[in-house]
Every structure is written in C-alpha cells, then in structure tokens.
Image (spheres, grey):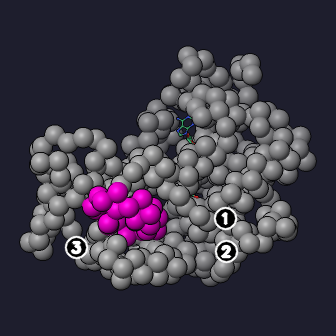
Amino acid sequence: MKLPNYIDLAIIGAGVQALTLTTHLLQKSARHYHKFLVFDPSQTWLSQWQQQFAAQQIPYLRSPAVHHPDPNPHQLRTFAEHRHHELFPPYDRPGTKLFNDFCDEVIRRWKLADKVYPAKVIQIFPIKRASHSRFQLVLNTGETIMTRRVVLATGSGKVQFPEWVGKITSDYPLDKLCHSQQVNLNQLNLTGERILIVGGGLTSGHLAKGAINLGATVTLMTRKQLQSKIFDADPGWLGPKYLKDFHAETDWSTRYQHIQQARNGGSMTPEMMLQLSQAANEGKVRIDECCQVKDAQWQNNLWQVYCHDGNKHQFNRIWLATGTRFNVNKHPLLEDILNIYPTQIVNGLPVLDEHLRLPKSNFFIMGALAALQIGPVARNIGGGKMAVGRIVPAIVKPSLAIG
Ligand SMILES: Cc1cc2nc3c(=O)[nH]c(=O)nc-3n(C[C@H](O)[C@H](O)[C@H](O)COP(=O)(O)OP(=O)(O)OC[C@H]3O[C@@H](n4cnc5c(N)ncnc54)[C@H](O)[C@@H]3O)c2cc1C
C-alpha cells in the first residue's frame, strides 16, 4: 500500500477497540468514510489479542457474546448458529476460536483487511495554527503522514513489576522470571518444575492451569484473598445503574476512586476458582493468599524466595501476573501532544472531553486511558463500544467537529 500524504483520521493500534471503532464509523457514514488508516507494526488486526490468548491457552472469553466489534449486538450469536457448543455458560461467553473466526468475518464484511498500514507510530508532532490544526505522524519505516485527527488505541499499558523485582542482585536467566505477557505456554516443557505465580487475577489462573498441564506444580501467591467474580467489573458499569452517578460526579479524583473500587484488583471467574481448588486437592497447586514476596535471589539454579510471613520457598521459575499500569505521562507518543494540548491528569489518567478528545483538539484516546469518562470497563470490549459511541459522532457530525 502506498502511504498517502494526508488523511482525515489516523487510528493508532489495530486491536479490538480500533476494530470496534472502524465498523461503527463505517456504519454511521453509510460506508462512505474512506479517509482513514490504521497503523500497527503487526500488519494485521488483533495480532496482540490473538497472541495473548494463544500463549496463555485461554479457552474462552470472560465477556459475554454481545461484546464484540460489530455494530449489531446479535451478530456473534447469529454467526454461532451452528457452533452453539462454542458459547459457554453463563452469558454465552464465546470460545476463543469462535471469537477469532467471527472477527475475521467482521473484517471481511466491512472490507477492513487493507486498512492496516504495517508500521509503528514512533512520534506525533502536533501542528497548531489559528485556522486549523494537524498532526504529523512519524513511522518506524522512516515515512511521515499528516492527519487531521488521531485516535490513540494502543491498548495494553506498561507492565507492572512488584517492588522486590528491582532489588534482585543476583544474575539470573531472563526466562526464569517473566511477566505474564512474556509467557508462552506453547513453547515450554515444565515437567517436574516448581513455579511461583504472583497475582490474583484470571491470568494467574490460566497460567497455573497451563503450567500444571505441562507437568509443573504451582504456588499461586496473592496479596489479598482470591475474589470470585464472573466479570472483572460488575455489568452495572455498562449502563445507567452505576454510570449515572459516575457521570454526575464532577470531582475527577472521586471518579478515579470509583474505578479502583469497582475493579478492586484482580478477580477470578467462579469456574476458574473451582478448577484451582480441585488442583489444590490433588496437590498440583498451592494457594498462598494474603502472602507477599519480600526478597528473591537466584542461587544454585533455583529461586530462593523469602516471604513477609518469614517462610522461605524454592522455585524453578517465577511468573508475574501483576497486570499493567496506564499512565499518559509515560506513554511514548504523548509527550509532545500534552505540551500543546495540556489537560488535568489524575493518577495517570487524562481528563478528556465528552467525545474523548484532549481539550480543544482532534486527538482522541480510547481504551483504559479513557476510564475517567467511560468508567471501570474502559479497557474491555464493552468499554470500547461505549468509547465509540462518543468518538464517532464527533467525527461524522460537522457540528461536533473541532478545527
Ligand atoms: C489475556 C487477556 C484476556 C482478555 N480477555 C478479555 C475478554 O474476554 N473480554 C473483554 O472485554 N476484555 C478482555 N481483555 C481486556 C481487553 O479487551 C483486551 O486487552 C483488548 O486487547 C484491548 O483492546 P485494545 O484494542 O485496546 O488493545 P490491544 O488488543 O492491545 O491492541 C493494541 C494494538 O496497538 C498496537 N500498537 C501499540 N503501540 C503502537 C504504536 N506506537 N504504533 C502502532 N501500533 C501500536 C499494538 O501492536 C496492538 O496491536 C483481555 C485482556 C487480556 C490481556
């Protein structure tokens, strides 16, 4: 594909959120809106999503069948007409293969396959004039392109490591201490190994199950007690039940507190809790709740792990399912943008306008960084849909446009 000099809209990232945005944009513009491109170094839609699901051997999604990138909420169920066994109770949560096949069909039906330009955006220069403003994107291919609008949909945030990791003084093989995003269960043989998994979210559960299947015994260590929840945030956060009060709250710090309380760290689905307790009964996993690592050192080919409760354990590997952190100040693409379009930042989250723009700009942000407007589900597929409901009108309706 030849890169044009100028486009109306650049979408950065080709994940689930960006795919949701493009289908809704085309729907609302009767498929006439062609002046956009999506940038992603992977060249294809959903590569990060598919890689993570495959690497962690996740059998089905946590979200229900109505959450997907197509504008018609029933479309996935219709697609699954002859594949009902791939919808898992409760709430018909789609199997991973079903969801991926469905997304392929969405990409085909909306003719989006050639919309992903294979490049990473490495810098964005805001160009602000009295009459209009533009953004110049610099790509890792050395090319540049001008755009009127940008939607930042780069997803996952910065991996979060516990403090004790920074205090490890011994050298260790890098594959013996990994963040969950770096673990690929398909490339490992763990026969006879002891693995420490830190974190109490669903990812810990997937990794524990995978490691057990590969012949390891697992210790799952969590700061708090494991929480059992079907979804990561209550479905009341997808509609007026909780969002009415959330949006009425004018203090951004209080909104931030509500987001934190609603997610309350990680949680596991009830069926994952059941599988783990069965594995615990069989002696394949040990669950250490309310326990924290104090120090770990690599000695004699093993991790010597010292905990706050005074106990010492030995492991062959440590996996950190400790999540990611979202902070606009640390986002590699946002420094120049925030200098020109400053906004209040609350615990790393930007205050955006109601269409998810940085104030008085055509720079939109979706995903977890839009949580002060969207709420605790901002990072999820359902949150993506809510974000799109705010972004698309500002793009297709001239009366809502800036510049
Ligand atoms: C293991 C896992 C399971 C999950 N399961 C569910 C679920 O069942 N239901 C649910 O609702 N949510 C789920 N989530 C949460 C969320 O839906 C996913 O994280 C989802 O991938 C978020 O979509 P996204 O488009 O924001 O980001 P991503 O899917 O991470 O996509 C972002 C894209 O941006 C690209 N990118 C990044 N930087 C640049 C750059 N500088 N230039 C160009 N491209 C760039 C990346 O290559 C990537 O392809 C899950 C998350 C994880 C990690």
Mark earlier in primary sequence (3, 1): 1
Magenta-tinted stretch: 191-218
- Asked if residue 167 shows in the view, the reply is no
The image quarter containing residue 377 is: bottom right
Which residue is rendered at x = 75% and y = 22% of the image?
1
Which residue is rendered at x = 17% and y = 52% of the image?
302
The image quarter containing residue 130 is: top right
Neighbours of disc 3 within 10 Å: few (<14), some (14-19), many (20+):
some
Could you say which is closer to the camera, residue 11 or residue 337? 11
Is residue 301 one of those drawn in magenta? no
On the image, numbered disc 2 is attached to which residue?
Answer: 88
Q: Residue pushed farthest top?
A: 142
- Contact check, label 1 and label 2, Cβ < 8 Å: yes
Q: Is 348 on the left-hand or right-hand side of 297?
A: right
Task: For marks 1 and 2, give the CA distance.
Answer: 7 Å
Residue 309: give x, y in percent of width and height. Answer: 12, 74
Quarter the C terminus occupies: top right
Q: Amino acid at mark 2?
A: Phe
- Contact check, label 3 and label 1, Cβ < 8 Å: no
Q: Is mark 1 within 8 Å of ligand 1?
A: no
On the image, numbered disc 1 is attached to which residue?
Answer: 95
The disc at residue 315 is: none
Kind of element beneath mark 2: strand
